[in-house]
Image (spheres, rainbow, N blue to C red):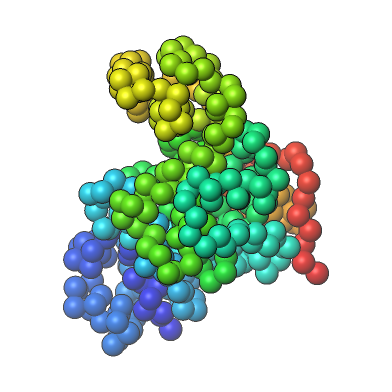
Amino acid sequence: MVTPTRITLARKRRGLTLAELSDRAGVSLQSLSNYETGRTGPRPTTVRRIADALGFPEGFFSGPEIDELPAEGISWRARTKTPPRVLDSARAAGTLAAQLYDWIDERFRLPEPDLPSLGKPDPETAAEMVRTRWGLGHAPAPNMVHLLEARGVRVFSLPPDSLEVDAFAVWRGRVPFVFLNTVKTVERSRFDAAHELGHLIMHGSGERSCSGPEAERQANDFASAFLMPASGVLGHMPAGARVDQILEGKSIWKVSAMALTYRMHDLNLLSDWQYRSICAELSTRGYRTDEPQGLKKRETSQILTKVFQGLWSKGIRPGDVADQLNVTADELGTMLFGLSINTTHGHDAAPADQAGWTLSLVR
């Protein structure tokens, strides 16, 4: 028995219209429409053709209903003109990652969500309040993925085919999710993580809009204040700093040169003229789209690594997890920040990072 919503989800994941899937699978457009609405069901041979066209195991389509991540609650960090099908594909990828989270949550004790509800403070105050609650003081923020995970945020990577989406966040019930692009520079990815945290904190109640120019500005200001607390920047950076001083100073907070320049201007350490001049010089040096001589080690999930270490110790291989979720190993791998789950001579490779503690399995 085929579950109609799973056909729709798989199609969206591949960024296809019904007409495009019809061409790929050799199934009529009207038939596909009927399958997705549940008016009729496909024969086993037709399911096989649809599965081959979409790159999903046949078993995926007969699983239970899957509730997609709530579209109205997603804060997209993406270009304004990003095509809807790209957003739909990223949302579908997030939905599949949420299924992986459900699978993990049944077997491991994960950190409980600890994101404060702050009412309606301004972004600067909100960032200070979160820092105080989490015991960060005025020190530079640590690994952002680890920090979010320790506070109960479920963090996954976005697939390579979602490059037009920098990041997005969403509440699924009482559980917060953040999805990050892993192709951007490390510094910009840290900012994206803080930006999405800002959305979860300030726009997560459902009472306030999580999208639009004003919400994006607020999330940017939150991220700037969270990563570069005012007292730290004022204490370390001189007024009217030169470009070389900014390039040296950005390593303190592990942010991009442009982000530190913006923050200094916001804190009145740079005049309007100085800000424009420095931005122009940084752009000439390649810092508008890249971060020359920036951080090399990407921040990745600690929890996912430890989960797969724990599974490995019990004889459960990543391929087994993919089979239970009825997705391919490649699809599973796109969620895991590059955690190695490839197979060699028919055997799964062990997780690349074997250091650190291991989560306890639920008995």
Q: Is residue 280 left or right of residue 324?
A: left
Q: Is residue 156 left or right of residue 45?
A: right
Judge whether residue 338 can be spotted in this image.
no
- Name which quarter of the figure residue 203 lies in: bottom left
Q: How far across and how far down the image is residue 162, in percent?
A: 37, 48
Q: Is residue 326 above or below residue 356?
A: below
- Nearer to me, 284 or 17: 284
Work out which quarter of the rendered image holds the C terminus and state it: bottom right
Q: Is residue 161 above or below residue 239?
A: below
Q: Is residue 71 left or right of residue 347?
A: left
Residue visible at 46% across and 15% down?
241
Q: Is residue 55 left or right of residue 223?
A: left
- Nearer to me, 121 or 75: 121
- List the single residue furthest toward the bottom: 39
Residue visible at 40% across and 72% down?
6
Q: How far across and how far down the image is residue 45, in percent?
A: 35, 74
Q: How far across and how far down the image is residue 163, in percent?
A: 36, 43
- Please state the total of marks drawn on the protein image: 0
Work out which quarter of the rendered image holds the N terminus and state it: bottom left
Judge whether residue 121 can be spotted in this image.
yes
Residue visible at 37% across and 54% down?
215
- Name which quarter of the figure residue 160 lies in: top left
- Nearer to me, 124 or 357: 124
- Nearer to me, 94 or 20: 94
Q: How far across and how far down the image is residue 335, in percent?
A: 51, 51
Residue visible at 42% across and 43% down?
220
